[in-house]
Image: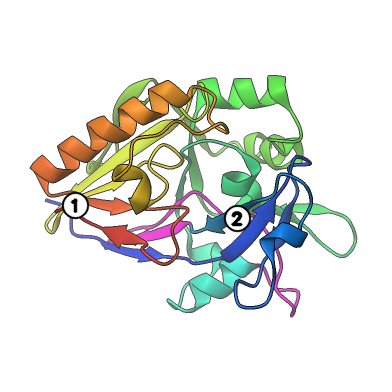
Amino acid sequence: MMKFEVFPLNEGYYTIGFDKVFHAFDIEKDILEERSRGSLLVEIQPFLVRTANDNILFDTGLGFFNDNRQLVIEENLAKHNISPNDITKVVMSHLHKDHAGGLSYVDEYDERHETFPNATYYIGEDEYNYALEQGEPSYELGDLELLVRSARVEWLAAKGELLDFISYEQDGGHCPHHTSFLLSGDDGHYFFGGDNVPQLKQLKVRYMAKYDFDGRRSAELREEYGQKGRQGNWTFMFYHDVSIPLSKLA
């Protein structure tokens, strides 16, 4: 069995309104009701998975800079003594800009660059084609076009395995071609459900979210994954839950 470690990369809290623009939010000072109409509070958290041979990212965050003009994801990786150049694999659940924004960045000369120039990217081909059709504001086409030009994309089918310890399946729900992943190793199973299983509380209460493409499907998936997780003693990796990044179900 594969041995690996999982590290959450907490990017903090943000709000997003009807304009689909993300704004940093200080939970100790800012007031949600003072944000633009329809604003929701969102937590952002990619994951780093380290094996003996690879540094793997699961989704890439917003691609925002900190006050020192350093990418937030670069700052977070540095806490684990890793630079963006050290990332060997990037695995994407889907390509909404709060998950794929970190794929590239624009420098002070308005030129776009890959954030992870040495990585191979694993992306659902159906999701990529859908993103090109839909475009902004949910998808940032600049990220996607640069990504494909890199010629280091491995297209994910509807279902399969990669890297000998990760199985995946295109499950839909949050968006038509969303993909979820199950990592199996020496320490058990870890499940990354992207936006179909974004928070612990969503596994405990059944409801349908308006922001999902197919809310009923997403609710059914959460119930299914919750049952499998209890039976299989999975550890869930929550992309939108910075206070509880990793958890098993009782």
Q: Determine the residue positioned at 50% across, 42% down.
A: 121
Say if residue 114 shows up in the picture. no
Tags 2 and 1 touching, CB below 8 Å: no
Q: Determine the residue positioned at 40% across, 22% down.
A: 217
Residue 56 occupies quadrant: bottom left
Q: Determine the residue positioned at 9% across, 41% down.
A: 231
In the image, residue 197 above or below residue 58: above
Say if residue 156 shows up in the picture. yes
Q: Is residue 118 magenta?
A: no
* First to last magenta residue range: 46-71
> Which residue is identified by label 1?
249
Give the amino acid type for the residue marked by disc 2 in the picture: Leu
> Which residue is identified by label 2?
41
Residue 13 at x, y = what percent? 59, 64
Residue 183 at x, y = what percent? 25, 46
Q: Nearer the viewer, residue 171 or 51?
A: 171
Residue 9 at x, y = what percent? 47, 65
Q: Determine the residue positioned at 51% across, 21% down.
A: 176
Real-space Cα separation, disc 2 to disc 1, in angstroms? 24 Å
Give the amino acid type for the residue marked by disc 1 in the picture: Leu
In the image, residue 207 above or below residue 45: above
